Amino acid sequence: MIKKTIIFLSLILFLFTNCKKKDFSLNGEYEDITIVYALLNPDDTLHYIKVYKSFLSEGNIYDAAKDINNYSYIDSIEVKMEEYNGNQLIQTIYFDTTTNIPKDSGIFAYPLQVLYTCHAKLNRDYTYKLIVRNLYTQKTTIATSEMVGTVGVKYPVYYPGKINHITFLPRKQQIELVKGKNIAVCQAAYHFYYTEVNYKGERRQQKPVIWKVGESKSDYISYVGETLLKKIKDEVKENKDVDYRLTDSIVLHVYTEAHDLYLYLLSISASTGLNQERLEYTNMKSYHYKDNQLVEDNNALGVFSSRGHFSLMFDEFSKNTNDSLVNGRYTRHLKFKKYDY
């Protein structure tokens, strides 16, 4: 999903591919192209935004990318977000710089990276306007986005406050969703949690088996249930020190993408087939001052959008599915038991 993490899609795609549509050339005149990647989650209270700039280099471009001053505005920009209920401005939220999230080794400078962060409780019914202003040139980059709505699950059936069972069948099944506003795509994944007990009686919960079921733009996500048992067979290894294994829970995760995010991800996905043309999408707009007026200059890339996450925890498999786990052809060698007494 994904918890309070940032989905960071490759900036190298921005700097070396998308800039071509602006006739960006090492031999041309430099343009300050602002690159923004901002995903809000209305369930979070801590939010991060990435803001970078394009750069030119006379030398090796990879060496230049290792200098953070080449592509980061650092503290020379003001980043803020306006919250609107209809046309009414509710509040203005200001972002501070942070370097507390180290970056892995790669093309760009590491471990230092500059992000812009704020603490704020967001409202799913409101609209948010991101404003990035260069304190020296007054160039302003703006984007507006609605929040992604809530999502519910009608099937598999879940009863709050009860012990819930879930069934996985050797035939087609469906997750049935109830989608709120501004949800373009839903993705689903099952996480299977289990505990190993060795011959000394020591217990250890292992990493979950994660089955990414798929995604859909409709209210249904289809799958064949016994695929989870095949996934367990592939990922849970036989171990001579293990006496038996127990099921802890099965968690259904549903991840949602707002429409702007969906279009952006579609635009940067790999081209397939004979038609290699790429959809170009950004909801960022940039402006500079000319004759004391802001004039749009199209020197902005990226996306300002939102995403969501919903989960349900099922306590155990249904009787038939548990029989398949314990005695079935895929997993009977893995020593699963329903109870340890």
Image: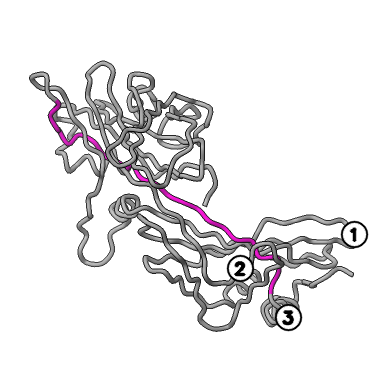
Marks counted in the figure total 3
Tell me which amino acid carries mark 1: Gly
Q: Residue at the location (50% across, 81% down)?
A: 172
Mark 1 and mark 3 lie on one chain; the one further toward the N terminus is: 1
Q: Is residue 191 above or below residue 294?
A: below
Foreground residue among 25 and 200: 200
In magenta stretch: residue 184: no
Q: Amino acid at mark 2?
A: Tyr
Q: Position of residue 8 (x, y in %)?
A: 42, 43
Task: Tell me what residue is drawn at x 79 percent, y 55 percent.
Answer: 204
Percent coordinates x, y for residue 52 in the rendering: 33, 31
- Sooner in the amino-acid sequence: mark 2 or mark 1: 2
Mark number, residue 323: 3
Identify the residue position indicated by label 1 in the image: 201
Callout 2–callout 1 Cβ contact below 8 Å:
no
Q: Label 2 neighbourhood size at 10 Å, few (<14), some (14-19), many (20+)?
A: some
* Residue type indicated by callout 3: Asp
Whether residue 311 is in magenta: the answer is yes
Which is more toward the observer, 314 or 326?
314
Q: Position of residue 215 (x, y in %)?
A: 43, 65
Nearer to us of marks 2 and 1 is 2
Label 1: few (<14), some (14–19) or many (≥20) C-alpha neighbours in 10 Å: few
Q: Crowding at label 3, few (<14), some or many (≥20) Cα neighbours within 10 Å?
A: some
Image coordinates for residue 160, horizontal then vertical, percent: 64, 63
Q: Secondary structure at mark 1?
A: loop
Mark closer to the observer (2, 3)? 2
Q: Which residues are magenta?
A: 294-317
